[in-house]
Amino acid sequence: MEKPVTGSKKVFMTGNESVAWAALAAEADVMFGYPITPQNEIMHYWARLGPKYGRKFLQTEDEISAGFTVCGAVIAGKKAFTATSGPGNTLMQEPFSMAEGMKLPTVTVIQQRGGPSSGTVIYSQQEVTLTTYGGNGEGHRLVYSTASNQELYDYTIKAFNVAWKYKFPTFVLGDGYQAKMREPLEIYDPAERGIELIEPTPLVGVPGQIGVDREPQHLCNIYSLEEELYEAVMHLQSEYDRISPEIVEYEISFVEDADILVVSHGVVSRSVDDAVEALRAQGIKVGSFRPITLRPFPTQALLDVLGSGVKKMLLVESSYGQLFRLVRQEIYGETVPIETLFKPGVGIIDTDIIEMIANMI
Amino acid sequence: MKLVRVALAGEGGQGVQSVAEIMAEAAYHEGKEAIYIPNFGLEQRGGVSIAFIQISDRRIGAPKFSKADIVVALSRRAMTRTHTYSGPETIFVYDSSFQLKDGDLPSQCKRALDIPAIEKSKELHTRVFNIIIMGAILSLTDMVAVEAARMALVKRLGYKFEKNPELKELNFKAIEVGAELVQKQSEGGEKVCAATK
Amino acid sequence: MVQPVMPKTWYRPTKPHKFCPGCGHPLILKALGEAADELGIQNQLIYGCDIGCSLLSWDFFAMDSTQTHHGRTTPVMVGMKRARPELICVGYMGDGGGYSIGSQHLVNSAIRNEKITLILANNTNYAMTGGQLAPTTLPGQKTETTPLGRDPESTGYPVMGPEMISAITGAGAYVARGTVSKYRQLKGFIKRALQNQMEGNGFSFVEALSTCPTNWGTNAKQTWNWLEDNMQAYFPTGELKSPFRKED
């Protein structure tokens, strides 16, 4: 069958559309989804494009079902994914928790909307805590926070590979702006960029005759004894710790001589970039640190930057301290004063940050 | 070219989103950076529809902005809804047919510009009302060349143009008409907003 | 010592099983095991079990198996079947998992006529959690959360699962209710529910009336009487919907 994306081409499309193309290019087999704004067009494009390339789609009865059907398909050895937002993300914490407990390489795209409750259908960065540490577990998940439609494409492809290589539930954390805006990006066949796609492997229905060639597969997620669960969780933790250094990603700019370090993630980091550039033009020594992986967090990289003479930090986010709490737990013991610019559920632009920094000097 | 920011607002059915998309796409085909984002709150099911467009030679930061270079309000409701995007450097465009009351114009703008686009579209064809508006916006900035806008129109409506070549001419004419309206009104002197009076 | 005859698809290292004496689950699972033996589908059948007492069967079979969450076995099996239609996906759950917390999944997968097989054990209570009210609890029946007996005025009447499923499924669906007291009939229903999936006809659903002496607080004789006199009187057994000809 022909490839959905051949070579490389420039396009002008929404983030939702770019996710659908990326999932096709990553050879995802099946999507399960339930309508919720602002992620709907991921399903719309997939439902139209998928069948042309032998891919499957099912609109389930709710987000709980979408998450668990993804788990089922992954257990059966297929690259399966879903996409959701807000209250849907809340409902999906149950299946994500099963994926954590059973080390299932599920892939989920979250396009954050305003909360709590139904909130807005527009935009926020308020699903950081839920996506990184939701569920009744220890947050054994891989979470990429994207800042552009190009990154939605790049990291959706990467999410499938990382999920199936490391066997942890993997998330691409976007937002309503990225979902709905059109901007230029390049879509490409991963093979053209030297990206080798990882083949999925089944956990059940594996080759060989039971009792002759192999034992039956018995997958469990509930334990009779505390000690059994402890062993299982500690195993997950040690696996997570082992692979984290290979996974962490971040972006830094103008940090070498920065007095003030602005920390942000996702689409807000674009405004930070503009603000830093404008302030540097005025001779103000400002730098930027942007974690791309929120789980695992690029802790050492941030500590290194802080150790190079940063006098103050500014945390900027479209939520009331969700990134702030992540950062604070990771740099526990550091004494650099932290100021904050929290705008829950509202976009942040460069002038907001410039004003804030003017007050900090 | 420096960053140009446009907020375009109107009632559902006035073609606000589609014309915003055409302009952004035209800029993209010119090799510029472009972001187009619709307001997609619950208002998309009734109420004022707003499109945010940013075009630049360089990478664009935030997808939204606080003050626009050009605000276009295609209904009276849309005027008050878009006050927030009008700052001291903003050209605030609205239709001449609106019976303005106190408070309809924003407290801040560089220039308030009314154009008889609704009236003119009745002469030409009501279907091209939004294209007239596009012509007006293009003539106020250097964000997209007219030729690129024409190409984007052909790309979008090509299948309709093939069936009906007159439609193509009508659309191209609408771009010109929009520019002429701006020209004419500008000759008649400039209005300013309350706070800048 | 003579070993009891076990189905080939039972996994011997996990026997004796973990269910209480007098529990109906092992009989239902024996019927499933024998049906799988007879159909020769040990290597194709994927067994998914719910939370509740059914979870104790996670390593019961010499067949690939997975646990899920309470009520979520249905969507897991749906996802699996959609991903790999060649697998024979069988979900096993209790009345709480199927008719209460997972009812939206049961109803919607039935409406979509998903080509999976679900077997639901109806023992009129939540057994694993200590004997609370279930959607299937009989009027007047005492449970931990209805200590004075179930009052339909306050908590409704017992759900008639197969009747509901047969009303909402399309052509090709197989729906039956059996009881562990009529083992041969129950095994026949389960076998047909598997065959129906193998033929790709549609949704297959078997409710099995089962026993729970531990939570009923009954001795052997009382247990059997409760099942045959009370439950079978309320929940009629038989096939409600079948694409197979009668003589099959």
Image (cartoon, rainbow, N blue to C red):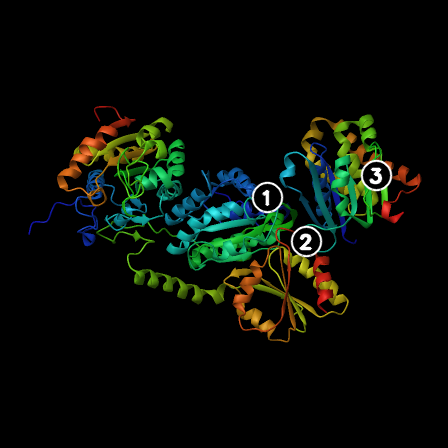
Q: Which mark is residue C191?
A: none
The residue carrying mark 3 is B102
x, y percent for residue A348: 67, 55
The residue carrying mark 2 is B62
Q: Are marks 2 and 3 in contact (CB under 8 Å)?
A: no
> Which chain does the residue under circle 3 lie in?
B
Foreground mark, 2 or 3, reads 3
CA–CA distance in space, label 2 to label 1: 18 Å
Does A310 sit above or below residue A15? below
Q: Give the residue type at disc 3.
A: Asp
Q: Give the residue type at disc 2.
A: Ala
- Residue A312 quadrant: bottom right
The residue carrying mark 1 is A121
x, y percent for residue C179: 21, 34
Q: Does any portion of residue C170 appear in the rendered image?
A: no
Q: Is residue B114 left or right of residue A254?
A: right
Of labels 2 and 3, earlier in sequence is: 2
